[in-house]
């Protein structure tokens, strides 16, 4: 079974990655297991890919195992892509419910509620160069939070592909069409077709 270190302090993200990758013989080691953290790492790149690489490089210095890192965010068209790269840092000291309520308030005067989730996954220490896998999930922002599954902005995001909100279905449903799920599927295809160590 292949082992990767997940460069994230987010327990929800670890759970999501494990659910998607475990059926393919991949196990994830958390930063907590290694006594590491991303605390103090400055994610100041101008792209999701850049921030994912920053996090991966910060952890790859401390392990010889392959490191997988993700940077992702929600882009709302009417708000010029906000919160985008700052999706996690927006109202960081507040709860997800409060963040979602704030976004809904910001959109009250807009008819266009189209939005998309984006994910960039970087893998280091597997081959002699960084590997990059991208995923996007189209949809729109609902008028109220719905559902109890998922995390972050999931309760206010309606998935065009699912036909309901990310938080209204099962985690398995979301993982099939989510931005992160799509990027991880590309990683799985790469490992299946091109990597045989």
Image (spheres, grey):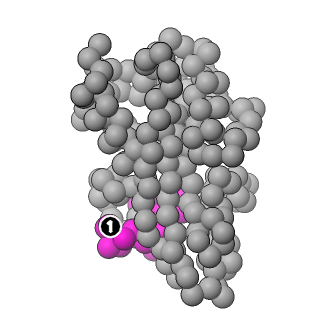
On the rendered structure, is 192 left or right of 6? left
Residue 23, relative to residue 167: is it above or below?
Answer: above
The span picked out in magenta is 146-164
Q: Which of 159 and 19 is in front in this view?
A: 159
Residue at left 35%, top 27%?
A: 27
- Residue 60 lies in quadrant: top right
The number of numbered discs placed on residues in the rendered structure image is 1
Q: Nearer the viewer, residue 74 or 151?
A: 74
Residue 164, relative to residue 50: is it above or below?
Answer: below
Under circle 1, the secondary element is loop
Q: Where is residue 165 in the image (x, y as percent from the top left)?
A: 40, 70
Question: Does the magenta-highlighted stretch encompass residue 153?
Answer: yes
Residue at left 55%, top 49%?
A: 72
Q: Nearer the viewer, residue 141 or 151?
A: 141
Q: Where is residue 167 in the image (x, y as percent from the top left)?
A: 42, 65
Q: Position of residue 126 (x, y in %)?
A: 43, 19
Question: Does the magenta-highlighted stretch encompass residue 44?
Answer: no
Q: Is the magenta stretch mostly helix, strand or loop?
A: loop
């Amino acid at each position: 079974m292949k082992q990767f270190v997940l460069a994230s302090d987010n327990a929800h993200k670890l759970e999501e990655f494990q659910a998607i990758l475990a059926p393919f013989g991949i196990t994830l080691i958390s930063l907590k297991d290694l006594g590491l953290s991303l605390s103090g790492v400055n994610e100041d790149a101008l792209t999701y890919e850049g921030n994912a690489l920053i996090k991966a490089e910060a952890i790859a210095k401390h392990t010889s195992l392959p490191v997988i890192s993700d940077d992702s965010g929600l882009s709302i068209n009417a708000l010029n892509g906000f919160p985008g790269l700052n999706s996690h840092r927006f109202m960081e000291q507040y709860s997800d419910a409060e963040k979602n309520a704030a976004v809904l308030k910001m959109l009250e005067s807009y008819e266009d509620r189209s939005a998309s989730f984006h994910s960039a996954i970087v893998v280091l220490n597997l081959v002699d160069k960084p590997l990059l896998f991208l995923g996007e999930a189209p949809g729109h922002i609902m008028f109220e939070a719905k559902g109890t599954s998922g995390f972050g902005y999931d309760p206010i995001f309606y998935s065009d592909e699912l036909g309901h909100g990310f938080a209204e279905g099962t985690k398995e449903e979301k993982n099939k069409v989510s931005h992160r799920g799509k990027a991880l599927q590309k990683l799985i295809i790469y490992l299946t077709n091109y990597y045989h160590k």
